[in-house]
Image (tube, rainbow, N blue to C red):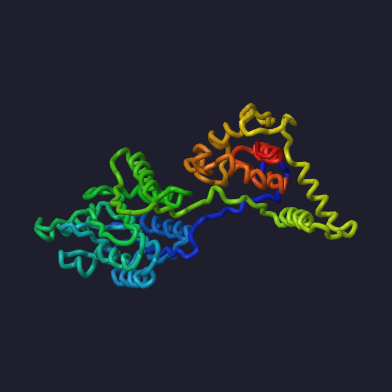
Amino acid sequence: MRGLGLAVLALVLTVTVANAERRIALVLGNSHYQNAPVLPNPVSDAQAMSDRLEKLNFEVISGFDLTKAQTQEKIGQFAKQVRGADIALFFYAGHGLQVSGNNYLLPVDAALEDETSLDFEAVQVDFILRQMSRETSIRLVFLDACRDNPLADALAKESGGISTASSGLAEIQIENGGAGTLVAFAAGPNQVAYDGSGEHSPFTTALLAHIGQANVSITEAMNRVTSDVFKATAGRQRPWANVSLTTDVVLHKVNLNAPLIVGDSDAASIEGNSQARSNAAGAATPPGSDAGAQAALDQLRQKIPKLESDAPVLFDIPIDFGDPAIDGKSIAQLIQGKPRFSPVEGLDKSVWDNHCSGCHQWTEERLCDQAQNYVTSDISVLRLEHPLGTRFKVALGKWAKNGCK
């Protein structure tokens, strides 16, 4: 809070994730291959993704540098837990390949001496998709598995050029069911992705940056991922997604209209005691009781900023706020403009840097209801910096006192 000099105010952020929603994720990353060069990033990619998904309220089953047997064990655990989930998610980083249009993920002990080896040493992507499709509503798949793969080349040579093995992955057909499916590839069909020189691959770096952004749908997040990867690789790699979703999937929903609440217990109790006294009509109050709370309340009231003018505040008449950024504008004008500050600390600018009416659906009647709160509890204007500034809330309170005219 600007200028309050108090460390008593904090934001209680309301995240509107349904209480009953079940989110289950399987995250696998393989770097240390026994029969191929080590990949620098997949394990760190998968670990970072696992951490991110846990923060997004997923139950995460994860495994790193797994053999075929260990991979099958993790998939079996996932298959049991994911049944009936609202959102089922699978993320894989490591080697993958396609043969005759079928996609395979490679555990660290895969050798692939011939095509027969695929059934015994690799894991078919369709097999995992079947496990995550049982009574689930939404299925999200992210495959950072298009890296240049020497095992695919070796398999093609062993087959005398007959094999159609390729390091790039094939398009995955989506079956109908539930609210739909999104399958995202690090690169387009039959294309190879880059492992990158940083801590994470270009695809995972972008995915970590955008998955779970507040109030951003997963399809919009993938658009941003594609843009980031395309720029980071100078146009050499373009992620690709096959999407069949019947609803917007937002992994991190923030209610921008939620009440903003005093976070400090002392400040909250001060306001609570004040409200209790006003509600206890006719009740006798012993002299001197709540004196400390009243003194603290009065001290807070002294922090409420004053408007530049004492003139009555009307809805469509310009106001002298005493704040150059909004001076000379009316309430009606301001609620049609853009906010000055984020309503939630750390919220991505793309979410809040829009016309106020688009988020709040403000009407004169609704705004009056909000303004009445500042009359009932005048210090509530100090709870948090308003997107249009604290002085705007002060003006709303004066407007409400004037009957919201």
Question: Which is more toward the observer, 169 or 241?
Answer: 241
Q: Where does the image place residue 392, in percent across and percent down from the top left?
A: 65, 37
How many numbered marks does the figure carry?
0
Specify the farthest residue to the right.
287
Q: Where does the image place residue 328, in percent across and percent down from the top left?
A: 64, 26
At a point 35% along the width and 39% down the height, the residue shown is 231
Question: Which is more toward the observer, 162 or 337?
Answer: 337
At a point 23% along the width and 49% down the height, the residue shown is 189
- Is any part of residue 93 visible from this angle? no
The quarter of the picture where the N terminus appears is top right
Q: Where does the image place residue 124, in percent across and percent down from the top left?
A: 24, 64
At a point 65% along the width and 39% down the height, the residue shown is 404
Q: Quadrant of residue 387?
A: top right
Question: Which is more toward the observer, 36 or 186?
Answer: 186
Please give left or right for residue 306 compared with residue 198 in the image: right
- Is any part of residue 370 visible from this angle? yes
Question: Which is more toward the observer, 177 or 53?
Answer: 177
Q: Where does the image place residue 74, in percent across and percent down from the top left?
A: 35, 70
Please give left or right for residue 347 compared with residue 8 in the image: left
Specify the farthest residue to the top.
328
The quarter of the picture where the C terminus appears is top right
Please give left or right for residue 351 compared with residue 114 in the image: right
